[in-house]
Amino acid sequence: MKNALVMVVLIFALHSSLFAQSKVDKRLANSATALQAILQGDNGLPKSVLNQAVCVLIYPGVKKVAFGIGDSYGRGELVCRKGAKMNGAWSSPAMYSLDQGSVGLQLGSTETDFVLVVMNQKGADQILSGRTKLGANAAAAAGPTGAQANTYNAQAMNVDVLTYTRSKGLFAGVSLEGATMDTDNAANRDLYGKDISAQDIVKGSGPVVSAAKPLVNLLDKTSPART
């Protein structure tokens, strides 16, 4: 009887672990799809802006999950450039959450993809250090599109994070001031099989996990180095 109970517990634990892993893998796949769409959109994320970025946060399929104030909660990942100056190829992803609070009123009842582009080392250090509120801990603005993006110079602007969205096939640069980001420790543990910090993930030299390769390969192909 005791052995049977132990076996049931082990099977349940294995099933739970595999289920969590599949959710993280699906999130990474959805993020690659969302990023591809936003990169290709006429009013989406321009390559000229991505070329200046040090990190990118992708949150696919964010929904409004409460009524009243309109809270919404998203799950995605952070990918940063490698190297001491963060100007090389793209790292393995660190899993992150997005809590929008009243900003969720912008979403309505539809799913929205968000891409947050971190434009400098200051913004990257803040986000990697833990819980970050846009507008308070990191300056944020709607990302430029079209002709504005062609002349955008991140070094000349006092903005840490540029934000882009896609909802029902429509693209826009919108303000997410007030939204809060934080590391998703449980998802990082599911993906890497151990407790590991966001800093250690994006600054590590190990191979990219297979589930993240489509996303990282897309970034490497689109913008192999920071200019």
Image (spheres, grey):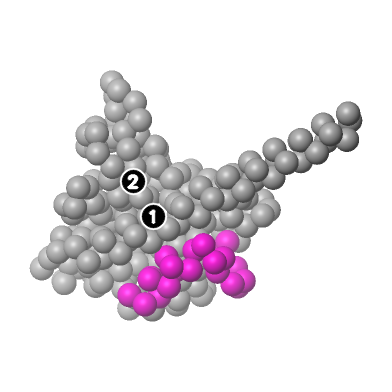
The amino acid type found where label 1 is placed reads Asn
Mark 2 or mark 1, which is nearer the start of the sequence? 1
Q: Is residue 14 above or below residue 103?
A: below
- Image x and y of residue 199, in percent: 56, 59
- Would residue 225 be found to the left or right of residue 15 on screen? left
Q: Residues under labels 1 and 2: Cα distance?
A: 8 Å
Exactly how many numbered labels are in the figure? 2
List the residue tagged with mark 1. 30
Query: Disc 2 on helix, strand or loop?
Result: strand
- Image x and y of residue 108, in percent: 22, 34
From the viewer's side, name the closer residue of 123 and 9: 9
The amino acid type found where label 2 is placed reads Gly
| Quadrant of the drawing holding the N terminus | top right
List the residue tagged with mark 2. 61
Does the image show residue 108? yes
* Residue at 65% over, 43% down: 15
Density class for disc 2 (Cα within 10 Å; few <14, some 14-19, many ≥20) is some
- Image x and y of residue 85, in percent: 47, 74
* Residue at 49% over, 72% down: 82
Density class for disc 1 (Cα within 10 Å; few <14, some 14-19, many ≥20) is some
From the viewer's side, name the closer residue of 38 and 127: 38
| Quadrant of the drawing holding the C terminus | bottom left
Asked if the residues shown at circle 1 and circle 2 are in contact, with their CB atoms under 8 angstroms apart, the answer is: yes
* Residue at 24% over, 34% down: 109
The residue range painted magenta reads 201-222
- Magenta includes 64? no
| Magenta-drawn stretch, dominant element (helix, strand or loop) | helix
